Amino acid sequence: MTSYIIRRLLSMIPVLIGITLITFILINVVPGDPVVNMMGKRVDAQTIANIRHQLGLDRPLYIQYFDFLFKAVRGDLGRSFYNHQDVMKTILQRFPATVKLSLTSMIVAIIIGLTVGIVSSVKQYTFFDHSSMIVALMGISAPVFWVAIILQLIFGLKLKWFPISGYSGPEYMVLPAIALGTRFAATIARMSRSSMLEVIRQDYIRTARAKGLSERVVIYKHALKNAMIPVITIIGLQVGGLLTGSILTETVFGIPGLGRLSIEAINNRDFPVIQGTVLFTALVFVFTNLIVDISYSFLDPRIRYDGGEG
Amino acid sequence: MAKVQTPLNRSNKIKTAKKNLQESRSLYYDAWLRLKRNKAAMVGLFFVILLVVVAIFAEVLAPYDPYAQNLDYRLKPPTAQHLLGTDDYGRDILSRIIYGSRVSLMVGVISEGIALILGVLLGAIAGYYGGKVDNFIMRLCDIMFAFPELLFCIGIMFALGPGIYNVFIAIGFVGWAGYARLVRGQILSLKRMEFVEAAHASGAKDIRIILKHILPNTLAPIIVMLTLSIPGAIMSEASLSFLGLGAQPPTASWGSMIYDGRSYLRTFPWFSITPGIAIMLTVLGFNLFGDGLRDALDPRLKR
């Protein structure tokens, strides 16, 4: 296991370098000078040249890139062009909101998704099953930002149960978490239903029933355990979707998270912040994937990462 | 008397051969028969066809010019003249939704077309030649997968500048990795097969073997992946346009319409809601159809 983790960690290095390189190239092919953008067009050429020199933008590109890379390894992501704040600090300030949003929506989605999926599989072809699967299909097909707006409309503007925007207390998290979690819950519901249906048909379930175990024990102790493996896979695969969705959800609800930060940075042409958020997001993404992969081996002893190719 | 192949029994032979051919159904005909029985897939196909028809005949179907402003008639609720009401410039919302289908269809065709061509090309090269090339292309795939797609698109949009054609390019360039992995895997297993060896032995060139012998055999999973990737592309376009990076005003795009309607949520919610329904039905259609197609083309997967 340890050797597998080390191998995975090492294989992240080229991926992360690749991502920073791609972002760096993208940023530098952009037409328009960030300094001109920052100072406005009325500033004279000499001042602009001075600022470029101060920010190190007059150095050759490859030196700029390696400079960024070596500093990034030490946790220094530079300073924002826009408000001169430390990028790492800004990211760490904004990150908790995104984590809170993602985790809340994930927990809500898992609870709702699993319950609906399992009940649907046990009551296959009933009204509950049909209607919840139709709702799940719609949930998968609806854009996150649209669901967010509908929630704002119904629960914020019409019923006035929850605030529609801002970030100051737990009640502000309710609608964003539901909006972000809808797609996730729908995916989990569909997956857990089909996975349960597959497991329920297997011989060992028939054996369990035949020896007179109660239906509860059969479903919740015997079937559920094996049905969960593909569901966990889906949960792992959706982490990227959560990160993407949080950009949109944060935009709609005005939550000062990492997603909003990256959009702001892009609008302000704030290169160090763009670089920093991209690297940070990639790091989070790659690490969550690793954690998900490791957790499989605990859930399913048949999956072994030791030895072989892995 | 020696057996001589007379013209008569030759034509008989051709007849029986033709008859046999009719009896043995092709993979795709077989799949179509299975697909036809799948109600959900047929519902999906209906929405897909609806999108295509609406997009092609938008001029005929739209009751009004989607760009014609009428500032005296702004933000009106649905009436008999304007079935879905009018927007903040007094434009007919239904007409704009109808024209918006073009953007979505084009994203599906152009973006996924770019992704497909890039992915198949790189996947085929990686799988067929192996070694360092393979390693390099697969590391590129890892990079593409190590990053949320939308954020990647946003980055490219930032470099290219906003605009609907840039959206097509961005989504296309971000989406190739899935196809590349799929094609590579298929080729790795196919290139050891006898029919490929036979083609080699008879002196066929690499490019001919890839195009004529290997790719046709990977077609079914590629079609499935394509159908199931289109809704993702449509969703990405809507998201980018919603963030203001995609379609620029006055272009009618469902995503940007939802954004425009946000400011009037309190007074005129239909403005935001209706384009969202259009997105949902389109994505739903492709998802249902794609799921059905997967089951139909690969009966082994059928539960």
Image (spheres, coloured by chain):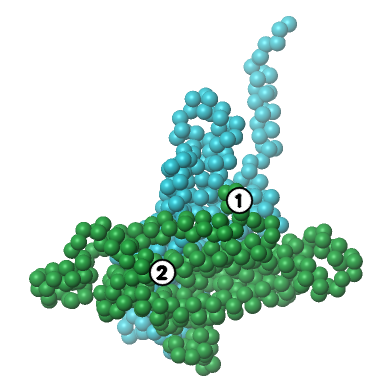
Q: What colour do you see for chain A?
A: green
Q: Of tags 1 and 2, which is closer to the observer?
A: 1
Image quadrant where one finds the C terminus of chain B: bottom right
N-terminal label among 1 and 2 = 2
In the picture, which quadrant includes the N terminus of chain B?
A: top right
Along the line of sight, the residue nearer the viewer: A200 or A62: A62
**In the figure, is residue A65 to the left or right of A296?**
left
Q: Which residue is mark 1?
A: A307
Quick one: which residue is furthest to the bottom in this view? A160
**Residue B211 spot, x, y in % from top left:** 48, 38
| Colour of the chain lettered B | cyan
Return the x and y of residue A247 as percentages of the image width and height. Answer: 43, 74
- Element type at marker 2? helix
Q: Is residue B214 above or below residue B297?
A: above
Q: Which residue is mark 2?
A: A280
Say which amino acid is labelled 1. Gly
Chain at numbered mark 2: A
